[in-house]
Image (cartoon, grey):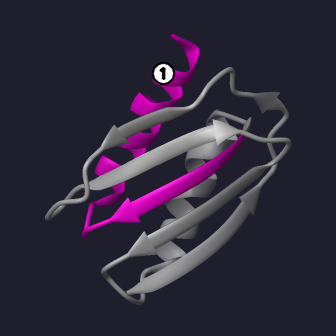
Amino acid sequence: MEIIELRFPGDRPIARCAHVGVVGSGDLEVLLSPAGETTVTIRTSVDGFGPTWQATLARFFARHPVAARVEINDAGATPGVVSLRLAQALEETQG
């Protein structure tokens, strides 16, 4: 089990909380809540992928500069699944 903490610039606060996905093989759970800055806490069952997480999330938050507290509980999801779940969670905050 590895815990990764990251920060990204963000100036658009989200309107409300969101919860998408499930912790299961090859999937992950994303929780978003309003905050003054973007902080990400990743709890993953797969050790050693910090640079991949950094690159995947940097790309996402460069396109979506929201201010939110992000919690990710991962069970081996691919970068594509990570981006999909983040986009779903972001959509939930706007609806």
Residue beneath the point at 30% across and 55% down: 28
Report the side of 74 relative to 91 (left or right): left
Residue 10 in the image: state x and y as whole percent. 80, 41
Report the side of 48 relative to 33 (left or right): left
Residue beneath the point at 57% across and 15% down: 94
Q: How many labels does the image show?
A: 1
Q: Circle 1 sits on which residue?
A: 91
Residue beneath the point at 55% across and 23% down: 93
Classify 91 as above or below 19: above
Q: Is residue 40 or residue 64 the one in the foreground?
A: 40
Quadrant where the N terminus lies?
bottom left
Report the side of 71 relative to 21 (left or right): right
Membership of 44 in magenta stretch:
no
Classify 19 as above or below 2: above
Report the side of 81 relative to 67 (left or right): left
Q: Is residue 20 or residue 91 the one in the foreground?
A: 20
Which residue lies most toward the left here?
A: 25
Residue beneath the point at 63% across and 35% down: 63
Residue 70 in the image: state x and y as whole percent. 59, 51
Residue range (magenta): 68-95
Tell me if mark 1 has few (under 14), some (14-19) or many (20+) residues whose alpha carbon lies within 10 angstroms of its own.
few
